[in-house]
Amino acid sequence: MKVRINGSDEIISEKLITLQQLIKDRGLSPKQVVVEVNLQIIPWEQWPQITLQDKDSIEIISFVGGG
Amino acid sequence: MKEDSLEIGGVKINCRLFVGTGKFPSHQMMQEVLLAAEAGVTTVALRRVDSGAKADNILDYIPSGCKVMINTSGARTADEAVRIARLARAAGAGNWIKIEVIADNRYLLPDNLETLKATETLVKEGFVVFPYMSPDLSVARRLAECGAAAVMPLGAPIGSNRGLKTKELVAIMIREIKAPIIVDAGLGKPSDACVCMEMGCAAVLVNTAIAVSRNPVDYARAFSQAVQAGRLAYLSGLAESVDEARASSPLTGFLHNED
């Protein structure tokens, strides 16, 4: 399936992948990021229950320095 | 000096120097700067993260007494700013938001109309909102009316270190607006911050000038002292300025015999 992650299209080979797995595969820790799927914020407690769907748009966001 | 804290959104802020966290070479350096400045408030931004990003979270380096305000930098419209604010709150960063809506790449000047729209929406959603704006009395008035916690006019373009180029307009805003006025952006020297405080600004926000200094920790300390000096002078009442001399020593003396 094809999903959009942080603005770039990506092909994911697994048929069933949870948000939890996606974040883990990318080497990110739940404490560090906030995730939005199709403009909806998904609290990390719900990540194991969310299965990615074709054409989902995912934003993975973190805090950085800024003025 | 009696207690003179700034109360915003039910929180007492003891230091009127706010320090941004951008452009520091490391989180450790940023932390030392915030401690040296005794910064009452700091700002942090949100960005997309790539896989394998560093595991340390900048929020863990912010001293406990320093209130965190998330900025909406990167937003070009009110809707984008609102979206960033909601993400920040969902990520556990609290509900203090600096609205920064910028649609001008060269001077990074804020879009006041989109800023006003975002402020209206976010105040209704329970955020404590600090709009960064181009100094304009009518817009400032409307921001205050719709519940902005403070209004933050720019002193000069972001990162320019040019000082308080908007002095006359900021002075009018201080006189006319009841909400706290916090000068944000463009302050380059401690004396710039001191001038803002002498005029009656509630606080100032500084980032680039400190971060790019040869010695950020000492420069932060210098800013902190300048903010305190300016505040103390404002509370004492500034001395009147006159065109002609007024002797400060007695002129009648023993050197000349008066007839």
Image (tube, rainbow, N blue to C red):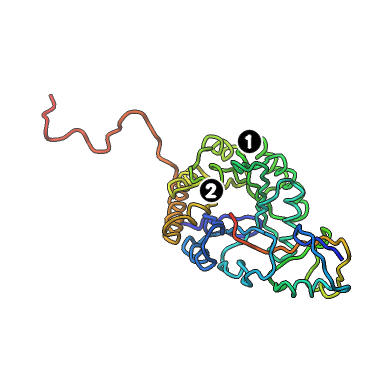
Residue B159 image label: 2
Amino acid bearing label 2: Gly
Q: Residues within 10 Å of mark 2 (few under 14, many from 20)?
A: some
Q: Quadrant of the N terminus of chain B?
A: bottom left
Q: According to the image, label 1 marks what residue?
A: B137
Could you tell me which chain the residue with mark 2 belongs to? B
Mark 1: amino acid: Leu
Q: Secondary structure at mark 1?
A: helix
Quarter of the image where the C terminus of chain B is located: top left
Mark linked to residue B29: none
Q: Position of residue A30 (x, y in %)?
A: 72, 73
At 72% across and 56% down in the image, what residue appears?
B85
| Residue in front for this viewpoint, B179 or B128 | B128
Badge 1 density bin: few <14, some 14–19, many ≥20, Cα 10 Å: some
Q: For mark 2, give the secondary structure.
A: loop
Apparent side of residue B130 relative to residue B194 in the rendered image (left or right) = right
Chain letter of mark 1 equals: B
